[in-house]
Image (tube, helix red, strand yellow):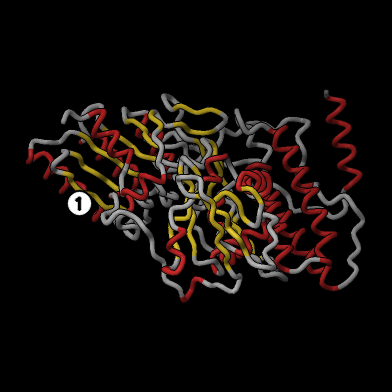
Amino acid sequence: MRAFFLFILLVLSLLIFVACENINDDIEMVSVYSNHMNALYPTVSEPENNAIDWSAMDFGLDFIANNEQQRKWAYDITKLRNHIFNIHPRFANANVDLIMDVHRNMNMGLAFNDKLESLLVDAQNMTKLEVMINLRYSLAMLNDNHLWFRDFEVILREYVFPLEFKFFSDGIFLIKAIDELNSFLNLEVVAINQMPISCIIDTYLTYLNFENVYDARSALGLTLYLRSPIGLSALGIDIDAGVVYTLKNFYGSVFELYIDTAYNISDLEFMTVQADESPLFLSNYNDAIWTTFIEEKGIVYIRINFFPYSGWTIYRLETIQAFNAAKASGNLNAVVVDARYNVGGHTNMGIQFIDYILHNAPDGRLFYFINESSFSASILYASYVANRGGTLIGQPPGQNVYFFSFDGDLDVSSDFFIELPYSGFQIFVPNSLLSIEHCSVLFEDMVLYPDILVDYTISDWINGEDPLLTYVINSFLDY
């Protein structure tokens, strides 16, 4: 085995063409929140003798640009590659973790390097959009949904069809559209331009998905691509003649919805067929945190849409008022912290807020809701609550239990931000590795599993029901 790795190193040394910048071998041990939370940068250990020296890694060919445009792409692609090998924790040899071992990362790094090498050669025959899509394929190989390719995400959302799809437990459905298309609402998507939805899902998982299968089901996953011409192109679907969505209803009847690629959402209004009253978790999306006391059920309900950088005094005051109302009524039966569709955010003061909730919740009656669109800080707090007696309910999140993040403010002055000089592409590359508290938390293949799995179906959406809140009421409260 040692001879094999020595051979690998010998081959790599022969392939070196231009030296990369040096990679730091040490990652400082830093607590993310406070001494309450066991979410640290990974333990520093000595790199193995046979670990690849990424600072000496380079493209394995004598590359000569055929024209000025290709020279510019070569410069940008090389600069991006070097930046990722320097910054990303996956390629810091000190980051030898129990799960994220150096051998797996070695293979991933070599494949990533090969992918960029092919793009460097092929870019001269591609449009800027095609290069952008191929860069997105390459970045997906790193299995890191915090890695943010800003330009691709902007163009993905900027030009979209007047439709919105959602992944439910029983399929992908059209949930919003303009008035003239409302007869297609709440129908299941079975194909796009005759490509079966199962094949489209497989393509997404192979080329575009970042972390786990639940990441693909998230609001930031596959459904975002299904309404975007750029996204459909990235999925290998030819849209030159327009897009035909094949849909079916509950009885199996099939319908075709044709969308001209000239549609743009900017001047169109959405409508949706749903119950007159939406469930609580679909209310007040713009508020970071809001709290209410459901008096008739005796439930303090705390909705966290994202963890903000500031404003915690106001959020805590509102929550204190809800607890005071519950205690005054003599009817505090349960506390729900709802972090579904919570993409994360800042963790500077959140731990104190969660500690207050833990201290005031009835014993054994604190429930933390998550789903496939719960990411980053929301699952760090999920594990924190679970290991202190709370119950996790919902669906597994799209974020793995080990994940990459940013140590510092997410802005263009950070060392993890890079703007490629010729294309102008802007990319944020994570520089830290985090993990949730394990203890009593269930996980398999790096996926966090709630204590109680509850599906959210298209029928729940249509009827305006919340099956998770209903489960708490029916199963744990005596009415």
Q: Is residue 79 visible?
A: yes
The residue positioned 37% from the left and 33% from the top of the image is 392
Drawn side of residue 461 relative to residue 366, left or right: right
Q: Position of residue 113 (x, y in %)?
A: 77, 48
Residue 2 versus residue 357: which sits nearer the camera?
A: 357
Q: Residue at x 65, y 42 (%)?
A: 90
The answer to whether residue 150 is above or below residue 24 is below
Question: At label 1, which amino acid type do we have?
Answer: Leu
Residue 306 or residue 279, whichever sits in front: 279
* Front one among 297 and 456: 456
Q: Position of residue 258 (x, y in %)?
A: 58, 64
Q: Is residue 460 left or right of residue 414?
A: left
Task: Indicate left or right for 463 with 406 as reference.
Answer: left
Mark 1, secondary structure of its residue: helix
Residue that numbered label 1 is attached to: 317
Could you tell me if residue 376 is visible in this image? no
